Amino acid sequence: MNVADSQRVASALEKLGYEHTARPDEADVVVLNTCVVRQSAEDKAYGRLQSLKPMKAARPEMVINLMGCLVGVKDNPRLRQRLPFVDVFSAPSDPAPLIAHLMQKEGRQAELEETSARYALMDEELTLPARERGKLISAHVPVVLGCSHACTYCIIPYRRGVERSRPPQEILAEARALAAQGVREITLLGQIVDRYGKDEPSYPTLAGLLEQVSAVDGIERIRFLTSHPNWMNDELLDAVAGLPKVMPHIEVPIQAGSDRVLEAMKRGYTAEDYRRLIARIRARIPGVSIATDIIVGFPGESEDDFNQTYHLLEELKLDVAHLARYSPREGTVSARRMTDDVPESEKWRRFRLLEELQEGIAAEIHAAYLGQTVPVLFEAKVKQRWRGRTPTNKLVFVEAGRDLRGVTAAVKIHWTGPWSMIGELA
Ligand code: SAH
């Protein structure tokens, strides 16, 4: 989501005449786009801010824009007070305050009102930043902004605001613009992406949107994330199975395998519901790959609760598990009403146990690709190898003399590991 938001800012800045530099000490404008989903992300943001402070002191004309979830959607006077050297504060996905500030500074008052209103609505056509144009093969397109499902651990609804779906025409225009700039794969994004259109009766469902995006010439592959288990209906699964451009890959977090913990998280389903959902996804989408997210060490998570998560993961054999150690976030229900009582060392132990388990599962799933030939969409050259992905989102590396960027080619797999595979052009 933040990568997509940053692209939008870079695009807006280039339209104003700015260009990219890799060095903050020579930049006229520095945008720091932030995440606060865990304390470690927030610490990193403050660390970067501290490193910008002396640059701002040396060159006061440098404009610093703090953006994203550290700022949030509501005005935050405490944050402004704490960071007096920041010139502009802006909410996630919103380049408007920065553009307004720069236009005012440059005396371009006349253009200002109309332009900033357009950026605020996100309907300004997205031109990729120059350094990505023609090079970026896989792009992210936010389709649902914000989130209105209050999982007790999660800060996102507080910082990204209420759920709102973007109009389908806007999404399609963006997909067409990206395709014209060389993009071949699009990932539709939302905190609960399978709720797309639920807030606006005139919009299609996610299944309908996938069908519409499928009609965009030049876009060869479509993915979407992240899904909430409760909204994954058969219409959506059948759309994934039936639309050739939609890849057989589902990201659907479970978060915990214990019903007691799931209830405390207010996720709205049981472990058995999730088990049945996985069976339903596998029955409807042949060859599907499934990724999940898990939080270990949620308040009150006992050894027995954790073992249930462990055994469920062992049983389901999912392709990927994104693991996190519980991090209390200011203002959330779990931070206000529950005690962060699983010691850090124990969170780490549980994390490593799941990591090791998942490494074995992934290695086993990948080994089944040995000797197979799969269509790989290549994105970039890393050292001497081309890097691409299978429809199931597996990372594949290939040595090849010719330029493979943006090309989908058949690859015969001859080595597999838990995180990637190696093959040769078939
Ligand atoms: N909206 C998506 C993704 C949310 S953020 C969803 O709910 O599935 C990505 C992941 O970060 C979450 O799935 C969760 O596993 C993790 N996460 C969120 N809040 C967290 C917290 N307070 N501590 C640790 N991990 C957290």
Image (cartoon, grey):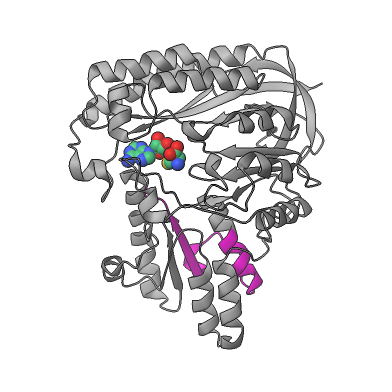
Number of numbered discs: 0
Regarding residue 69, the answer to whether it shows in the image is: no
Looking at the image, residue 290 lies above or below residue 189: above
- Relative horizontal placement of residue 172, taking residue 77 as reference (left or right): right
Q: Which residue is more in the foreground, 73 or 56?
A: 73
Q: Where the C terminus falls, by quadrant?
A: top right
Residue at 26% from the left image edge and 51% from the top image edge: 331
Residue at 52% from the left image edge and 51% from the top image edge: 199
Q: Which residue is more in the foreground, 388 or 341?
A: 341
Q: Does the magenta stretch include residue 34?
A: yes
- Within the displayed image, which quadrant is ligand 1 positioned in? top left
Could you tell me residue 218's position as x and y percent? 80, 45
Could you tell me residue 2's position as x and y percent? 50, 52
Could you tell me residue 81's position as x and y percent? 27, 71
- Relative horizontal placement of residue 45, taking residue 301 as reference (left or right): right
Residue at 66% from the left image edge and 53% from the top image edge: 168
**Residue 132, quarter of the rendered image:** bottom right
Q: Which residue is more in the foreground, 108 or 400?
A: 108
- Relative horizontal placement of residue 344, taking residue 199 as reference (left or right): left
Q: Which residue is more in the foreground, 326 or 248?
A: 248
Q: Is residue 286 magenta?
A: no
Residue extent of the magenta highlight: 8-36
Looking at the image, residue 315 lies above or below residue 184: above
Looking at the image, residue 78 lies above or below residue 175: below
Regarding residue 92, the answer to whether it shows in the image is: yes
Could you tell me residue 275's position as x and y percent? 46, 18
**Residue 384, quarter of the rendered image:** top right
